[in-house]
Amino acid sequence: MKILLVESNLAAFLSAVYYAYYESSPDLITSNCAIISLLDNVIEISADLVKARKVRKGITEKAGYAAYKEISDAYLSCDPAKEQKIYQYLQLLFKHGKAVFSMHHITEVIAFNDLIKKVRHEAHRMQGFLRFQEMSNGIFYCYFGTDNDILELILPHFTSRFNCQQFVLHDIKRKKLAYYDGAQCHLLPAEEVTITLSDKEVLISGLWKEYFNNVAISDRANSRLQTQFLPKKYRWFMNEF
């Protein structure tokens, strides 16, 4: 089986799509080394920004910028088979153009749309689930760890909401953060971050937990419904739990 093994980033994936279109069509595009066997013909593809831009241009010319945005969002998925699913969708897009948007019965389109749905749904959830804490230097800090790589997807929401406030969004799972200085965003690697909360934050956090525990009506407790709306996998970064 012919496999294009790519680096785990969108530019490398688009470079692989360029190779598949202009050089030789592969059986599989993936960034997952674990699925490769000794019998496979593996070609490693690194990010080539020139080729990636050409593929991006081809997508937008064929189906508009919204189509490229969908590709970009789908690549944020944690699905280990995302590269192949997106590649199969792109084959249809390049063949049929905007008509692919209405091909809801096609297996490859269903799989692609499922990637987008899960990424965007989790990003929407985080707009309400994330909790900021004031540090001693006045900067607000928020840590989280989601299934999908949504840091850059949720960033515009918070820069719009807190456009004059300095804050940090820290994706602990992927060891990176976004720092907003009140005017611009900076994406940085973050192996480990040490923070000191302000005295006011310590007080307010304590009051918030007390309020959360006391406002609940024990006779109406419904843990099953609560878990449905707020999965337990997200509660470790919410300070009321």
Image (cartoon, rainbow, N blue to C red):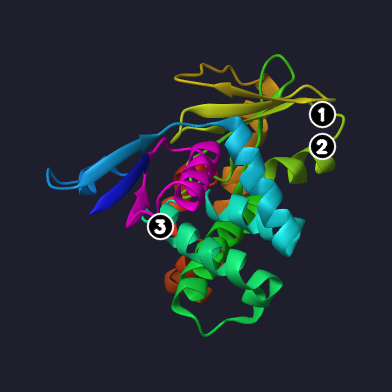
For the residue pair 185 and 2, the one nearer the viewer reads as 2
In this view, the mark in front (2 or 3): 3
Residue at the disc numbered 2: 162
**Going by the image, does 203 lie left or right of 119?**
right
> Which residue position holds label 1?
165
In the image, residue 65 sits, relative to residue 108, either above or below, namely: above
Count the labels in the image.
3
**Dot placed on the residue nearer the N-terminal end, 3 or 1:** 3
Eye-nearest disc, 3 or 1 = 3
Point 46% across, 64% down: residue: 88
Residue 133: quarter of image: top right
Please say whether residue 141 is one of the residues in the magenta stretch. no
Residue span colored magenta = 6-31
Q: Can the viewer see residue 42 in this picture?
A: yes
- Image check: 194 left or right of 166? left
Identify the residue position indicated by label 3 in the image. Answer: 84
Q: What residue is shown at x 15% (from left), y 46% (from top)?
A: 37
Query: Is 153 in front, or is 218?
Result: 153
Residue plotted at (44% across, 61% down): 85
